[in-house]
Amino acid sequence: MRAPMPRGPLSERVLASLTSGDVDPALPDEAVRAADASADLLVDEDVQITLTALYELHHQGLDGVDDRLEWDPTLLRTRAVLEERFEAQLRRDVAVPDDLLAELEASTATEGLAPAVARALFDLTSRDEGPSLSAYVARKATDAQLREMLVQRSVYQLKEADPHTWAIPRLQGVPKAALVEIQADEYGGGRPERMHAALFARTMRGLGLDDTYGRYVDDVPAITLASVNMMMMFGLNRRLRGCVVGHLAAFEMTSSQPNRLYGNGFRRHGYDADVTWYFDEHVEADAVHEQIAGRDLAGGLVEQQPALRDDVLFGAAACLAVDGRVGRHQIESWTAGESSLRRPVAVGSPA
């Protein structure tokens, strides 16, 4: 994708290193200073766009950047500094409720570990009481706000499933088979036109948006980047495999009904089934995926490796917390009569 624009001194130096190929050896120290000076890394524009650029080296790459820089030691140390601070803030700010942990201990004794973990995850996701972006879209969102929502979501949805796929070689047995089953659906079951990323691109085109991969990275705020970067951090670090499994479980468990509401919001504005196909597909698919993710993937992993239980629960709680902040940002911006984006987005004629 196109290299993003810098948003501060750290990203300016990192992006200059990437595009020139001459990596600044002081980048890790600059990353320490930037992270330590930040009051909240989730909304730190400089830090989050830096992580976005560094993570993209492991996905589709950046235009004009040498692919060999993916494994440059200085860039990896820079990323590690930011990840360490990012993870520390998440672990400090995100908590699994004590009563849920107590219930999990009790149900483990009577039901076994895998069913108890699945029950705990369903309980955790059912407790999410934050403002509902999907309900807002279904009832109130304007046509312009529908486009903004697609722009916000495009940063992840055009690479949908890829961050979680990193976990496949880190698992074995039942949880590995469960993850492959979920991901096979995400990738269209071998039919490229049915890949969920392709369906999302179709929706974007239907509203006159550019579906080029990474096109709107410069337009979305740090909190949106943070949501995707958290997924990338969990997926790319083997030691966080429990977190990425928990994240995916919560992601799937909170997808089916919201996607029904999103589809209703688009139908309310007169968009046809070609535009709503992406959302309608998720209503059915994720109703199945949530069962597989809870019981076979998350429950199966903890049954195999009980030491990962707390990371699985933390990954799920972090998904709910950070995505909740993304939704609140959009709702608060819109109810204040403002854009949720950093700058206006040009819109062409709907396809």
Image (tube, helix red, strand yellow):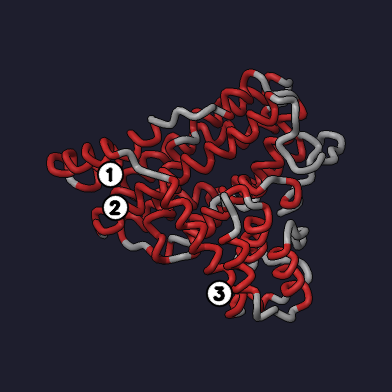
- Which disc is residue 77 wearing? 3
Residue shown at the point (63%, 52%) measured from the top left: 44
Q: Is residue 249 visible?
A: no
Picture mark count: 3
Measured from the top left, where is residue 55 in percent x and y? 61, 63
Measured from the top left, where is residue 108 in percent x and y? 18, 44
Q: Earlier in the sequence, mark 2 or mark 3?
A: 3
For the C terminus, the image quarter is top right
Judge the density around disc 2: few (<14), some (14-19), many (≥20) Cα neighbours within 10 Å.
many
For the residues bearing labels 2 and 1, Cβ distance under 8 angstroms: yes
Q: Within the image, what quadrant is residue 139 found in?
A: top right
Q: CA distance from mark 2 to mark 1?
A: 8 Å
- The residue beneath circle 1 is 117
For the residues bearing labels 2 and 3, Cβ distance under 8 angstroms: no
Q: Give amino acid for label 1.
A: Val
Judged left or right of residue 248, residue 344 is right
Residue shown at the point (31%, 60%) measured from the top left: 173
- The residue beneath circle 2 is 309
Query: Is residue 192 depicted above or below 145 in this figure?
Result: below
Measured from the top left, where is residue 312 in percent x and y? 35, 51
Q: Earlier in the sequence, mark 3 or mark 1?
A: 3
Query: Is residue 338 depicted above or below 39 in this figure?
Result: above
